Every structure is written in C-alpha cells, then in structure tokens.
Image: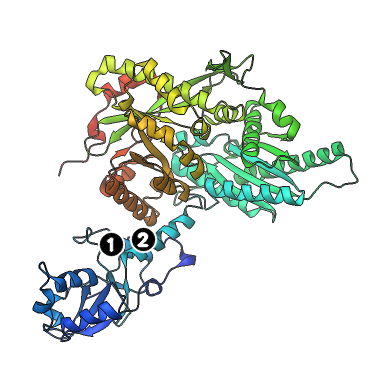
C-alpha cells in the first residue's frame, strides 16, 4: 500500500505551501480486535473525529478506516437492533481496508484531485495522511480540503495568471484604498491607463505566444521600475494601470501653480512609463519561450508603442470616477495617433463639465428618454453589435450567441467597448446603452429565426452594467424592449458582470426575479476572477455561470486552474446550473474543458465576434465536427 502522488497536480504557490498534516485532524487509531461496542461508546462520548483508523487484521499489518457516519448507521440498524447485533463483534468486520492514503508532503491540489476523481468521487471519503514511514499522522476531511483550496484560489485570483501582476479586481481594490488614504491625508492621486497599441497585430501576425511574451515583458519592466508609492496591475487584454500617491501640494503655492506642478509630474510619469515599454525592444524584445530569436519571435520598436492617459486629482477621490476619467484620457491619446501621453485634471468642476450631460446635442443617439428627449453618447462614429457563437461541447451545435458592443470610428477602425462604456457610465446612460444593445441584438435573433428556423441560436446573451442593475425600472424596460422585438422572454439570457458589488446584486434581485418569472435566464459572468462573483451565488437565484477566461488560459500550465474549474462544474451540477467557459482560443483548452464537464464554450477557437449579417453564413458553413469530440 502506497500513498498516492501525481506530477499532474502541483501546489498553487511555491512560497505558500500548506502542510496537509496541519489541515488534518489528529488520528484516532484502534486495534482490529477492539469491539464495535467500545468504538461506539467512545464516538458518542469522547471522540469528535469523522473517521477512526483501524490497525491490524488478517494477513499481517494493515491499515483501515471506519467512517463515523457509516459506523453509527450500522450500530443503529434499520429497526433499532444494530447495537444488539454488533456490540461484541470486532471493529475489523466493518472496516474499509482500502483507505485512500496521501503523503504528508503532497500539495493541497493533490488532495483535491483525489476527492474529485475515481470511483468514490460521489462519497467524498476522508483521506488518511501518512508520513514517509507510512505511519498515519492525520485524517483529512473533504471540507477542510475545499476550504483551504478556496482560500488559496482567492489569493491566487488576486494575481493575473499570465503576468503575475495584480489582477483587475485586486488593482481596483488597491486603488480604492489609495483613494481613501489620499482623501484623509490631503494627498493628490495620479492614475495612468496604459494601452499597448499593437498587441492585436502582434497576436494576429506572429501568434499569441509572442503576444503573451510581449505582455510578460512589459509587466516585468513596469514592475522593475515601480516606486514605493505606486500600484501596478493588468486590467485585462492589452491594458495596464499604474496609480501613484503624491504628497499634498505646497500650501505656499497658489492653486494654479500647484496644479501645473502636478500636471508636469503626471507627464513625467507617463513619459517614464512609455519609455520603459519602448525600451523593451532595445533589450532584445520579448522572445517566445523556447523560440529562436528572430523577426517572427521578437518584438521591435513598432510593437512596443503605448497610449497612456493619466487622470490626476486633488479633490475627487471616487475610484470609479477616476478609472473612467483615466480611460477616456487614454482614448484621447489613441485618437491622436497613439504612442502618446495625455493628462487630464479631475476636480469637482471638471467632473460635471466633462460629462456633457445625457442630452447631448450631438453624438450617437441611443433612443428616447422618459422625458421624450434623445439620449446620446458624446462620441464620434457609430456603435455596432457583434455576436460571438456559444456551442455545446458534446455535439458542437450552436446554442447561443453573446451580443458584444463595438465602436466604429469615423475612419472605419473597429474598437472595443471600453470608450462607449466609460462615457455611458460617466453620463448615467448605462441602462440606456444596455437596452440599445439588447434591442439591436433581439431584432437580429428574430431575423435569423425567419431564415434558419430550428438551426438558429436558442438563446441570446446580453450583458448588464452596474448602472442597469441599480435602475428601479430595469424589469419593465427590459420587458418592453423584448416585446417590441417579438423575442420570446425564454430566449433571453442576461449576464451579471463580476465587477458588480454584492450590494448591487442584492438590490437588483427583485427586478431579476421578476424577469426570471417571465422566462428570462440569468447568468453570472466571469466566475472565478475574484471572490465577488462566487459570493453572488449566495445572494441571487441564477440559471448558469460563465467561467472566467483567466482560468481557461491556465488550463495547460496552471494545474490549479483545472482543479478550480472542476470544483465549479460540480458546484453548478449540484444546483442545476449550466456552465459556459469563455476565452477558448486553442484546441487543447476545448479538450480539457470537455473532459472537466463544461457544457458550453465560446472563444476565438470557435469563432471571432462577427456582425449580424455574417452569423447566418457562419452557421451554414460551420462543421459541428470541429467542436464535437472524436469518436471513440
């Protein structure tokens, strides 16, 4: 008999290894000849252990285990006569002589793997922790493993899997703390949004391996130059952010002179960050791991361009306002041609002036407000809705599409949703923008069904913003849009983003339950990116979950990601929830997700987001065998 170990499962953090014997309960060991009556009395009076270990038995030295619950059930018996039958019989007769042994040096995820695989997966038996001499040193309960694993993943999720920097959620939390400190100490605060101008081109022309190397190289150089009062994080995709506390302005200076000094400081920060990123090319680029350096595997000066927008404030210490302001300033740098630094001042006066109001005379009109006036976003160009197919992992059939907002600039460039979303949040038009996307997408789905019939997607996934969740008339407005488009409520699936606070989710519960009563489905998005989305499961009735892309990214190189995905799948199965994984960009990820029991997937490996008129052709041309698992 040997303790199981496997190279497939490794500890999540080499610097924070948990000793399994510290998690385990002290072992209670009895000889095989001890009577069941003796064990029964001890369990009812003194022993609190969930299992008793048994030593000895026929055939020489052996180690067995008796589960407390199963033993007490036996002693009670079906008709209450169990103790009369078993009182004097040796405990060896009710012992399981094939216990699961695990070495005390094994990582935590090894224990999780043993609990979620094998014939006993459904019963979750205790594990016996043994030392190098095969002596039992503890009994490890499944609940102890899951609690420790959840704590480890909570800390693991605070870091970006690719770069090791603070994750978006962790950076936002840290920025909130910096805002509180700056407000109390009278400090100024600078927030720099950094966008890599050419990451998409690098990914498209040289592959994601080189693109990932570029991201890691940028992260490494930014972290190396980080100051003591600065916070660095990766917000996702090609975006990074740096926040810096600045000592209170000199009281002897006038306000204008103080602001000019802060602006100069912000420009210096931006140019330092831009030079740090540009300098990456001057140090041999960022070759892909294991690749021979060359024009296809390294990045050059043209690839390390960055647009940087910096918001500075001495009076407005609202985290969300600061994030939106920095984001908009970064987009101004991109519109100016990129590879540039722009600085803007956020104060009480500019906070109102910059918003331009929800009744802008120009811009993109989203619809009519309750007062009969047009609601417009102050942006140039137009908004579009693109669609990304979601397919099942068993048959490869398209089950749903997610509606994704896109911004078409006046020169024809297609950009992501960041700019419009920031403007909508700033102008209090979050709900209006969500409803506009829903209306456009619902009309498209109804049109597809006229053409495709049963082959059309069953569901339409639409994201809700935090502003929409706070709206008192959310349910009525959503029903109105769906009814006008003649889309059955049962075809709509609303996605709740991870960035929503628990309080916002709880406040929106009546509206979401009202919509669910009509047949609308609710899905939690980005589950696994932070503890927030997991907590939402306790405050809201939902119909499905979406696994965050960082877990999908780590399936090959981060074994802990597979463990967490498997736990999420089991949790969802226990509650009857559908599971979708997003960000599937490679075949090996699809294979792993299928093996782990994920129901549906979406990502570039399946299809890139596309305009509505291309969806019909894609469905007609797509071979489901590209997603369907190979025949046995």
- For disc 2, the neighbor class at 10 Å (few under 14, some 14 to 19, many from 20) is some
Query: Relative to 497, is 37 above or below?
Result: below
Q: Please state which of residues 140 and 12 is positioned toward the viewer in this rendering.
A: 140
Place residue 462 in its image quadrant: top left
Which residue sits at x=91%, y=46%?
A: 252
Residue shown at 44% from the left, 49% from the top: 535
- In the foreground, 534 or 156: 534
Residue 6 left/right relative to 168: left
CA gap, disc 1 to disc 2? 10 Å
**Dot 1 and dot 2 residues touching (CB under 8 Å):** yes
- Judged from the image, the secondary structure of the residue bearing numbered disc 1 is helix
Residue most extreme to the front: 80
Asked where in the image residue 45 lies, by quadrant, the reply is: bottom left
> Residue 69, position in %: x, y?
22, 69
Which circle marks residue 115 in the picture? Answer: 1
User: Which tag is nearer the camera, tag 1 or tag 2?
Assistant: 2
404 vs 351, nearest the viewer: 351
Q: In which quarter of the image is the C terminus?
A: top left
Q: Residue 331: in sight, yes or no?
A: yes
Q: Name the residue under label 2.
A: 146
The x, y position of residue 614, in whole percent, is: 36, 20
Work out whether 446 lies above or below 92: above
Quarter holding the N terminus is bottom left
Residue 39 image point, x, y percent: 21, 81
Residue neighbourhood size for the residue with mark 1, other residues' Cα within 10 Å, grouped as few (<14), some (14–19), many (≥20): many
Q: How many marks?
A: 2
């Amino acid at each position: 008999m040997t303790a199981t170990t496997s190279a497939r499962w490794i500890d999540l953090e080499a610097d924070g290894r948990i000793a399994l014997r510290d998690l385990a309960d002290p072992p209670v060991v009895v000889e095989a000849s001890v009577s069941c009556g003796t064990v029964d009395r001890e369990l009812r009076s003194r022993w609190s252990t969930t299992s008793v270990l048994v030593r000895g038995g026929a055939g020489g030295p052996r180690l067995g285990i008796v589960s407390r619950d199963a033993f007490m059930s036996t002693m009670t018996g079906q008709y209450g006569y169990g103790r009369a039958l078993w009182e004097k019989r040796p405990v060896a007769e009710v012992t399981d002589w094939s216990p699961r042994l695990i070495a005390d040096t094994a990582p935590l995820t090894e224990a999780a793997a043993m609990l979620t695989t094998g014939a006993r997966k459904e019963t979750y038996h205790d594990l016996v922790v043994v030392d190098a001499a095969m002596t039992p040193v503890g009994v490890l309960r499944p609940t102890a493993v899951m609690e420790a694993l959840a704590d480890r993943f909570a800390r693991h999720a605070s870091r970006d899997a690719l770069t090791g920097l603070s994750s978006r959620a962790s950076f936002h939390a840290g920025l909130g703390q910096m805002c509180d400190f700056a407000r109390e100490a009278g400090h100024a605060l600078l927030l720099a949004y950094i966008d890599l101008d050419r990451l998409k081109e690098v990914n498209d022309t040289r592959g994601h391996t080189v693109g990932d190397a570029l991201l890691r190289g940028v992260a490494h150089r930014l972290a190396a130059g980080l100051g003591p009062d600065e916070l660095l994080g990766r917000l996702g995709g090609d975006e990074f952010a740096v926040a810096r506390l600045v000592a209170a302005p000199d009281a002897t200076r006038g306000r204008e002179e103080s602001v000019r000094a802060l602006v100069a400081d912000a420009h210096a920060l931006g140019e330092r960050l831009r030079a740090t990123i540009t300098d990456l090319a001057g140090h041999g680029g960022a070759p892909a791991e294991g690749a021979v350096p060359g024009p296809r595997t390294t990045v050059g000066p043209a690839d390390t361009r960055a647009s940087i927008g910096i918001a500075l404030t001495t009076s407005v210490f609202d985290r969300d306002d600061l994030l939106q302001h920095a984001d908009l300033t970064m987009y101004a740098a991109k519109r100016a041609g990129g590879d540039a630094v722009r600085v803007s001042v956020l104060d009480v006066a500019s906070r109102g002036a910059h918003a331009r109001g929800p009744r802008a005379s120009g811009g993109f009109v989203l619809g009519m407000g309750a007062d009969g006036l047009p609601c417009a976003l102050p942006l140039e160009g137009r908004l579009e809705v693109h669609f990304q197919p979601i397919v099942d992992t068993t048959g490869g059939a398209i089950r749903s599409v997610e509606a994704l907002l896109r911004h078409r600039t006046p020169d024809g460039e297609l950009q992501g949703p960041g700019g419009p979303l920031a403007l909508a949040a700033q102008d209090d038009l979050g709900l209006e923008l969500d409803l506009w996307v829903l209306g456009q997408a619902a009309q498209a789905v109804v049109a597809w069904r006229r053409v495709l019939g049963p082959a059309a997607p069953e569901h339409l996934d639409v994201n809700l913003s935090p502003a929409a969740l706070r709206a008192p008339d959310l349910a009525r407005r959503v029903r109105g849009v769906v009814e006008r488009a003649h889309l059955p409520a049962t075809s709509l699936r609303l996605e709740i983003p991870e960035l929503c606070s628990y309080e916002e989710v709880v406040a929106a519960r009546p509206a979401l339950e009202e919509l669910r009563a009509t047949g609308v489905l609710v899905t939690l998005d980005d589950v696994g990116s932070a503890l927030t989305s997991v907590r939402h499961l306790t405050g809201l009735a939902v119909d499905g979950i979406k696994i965050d892309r960082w877990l999908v990214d780590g399936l090959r190189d981060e074994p802990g990601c597979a463990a967490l995905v498997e736990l999420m799948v089991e949790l969802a199965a226990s509650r009857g929830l559908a599971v979708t994984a997003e960000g599937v960009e490679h075949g090996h990820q699809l294979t792993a997700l299928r093996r782990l029991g994920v129901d549906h997937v979406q990502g570039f490996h399946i299809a890139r987001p596309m305009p509505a008129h291309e969806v019909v052709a894609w469905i007609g041309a797509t071979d489901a065998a590209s997603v369907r698992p190979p025949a046995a």
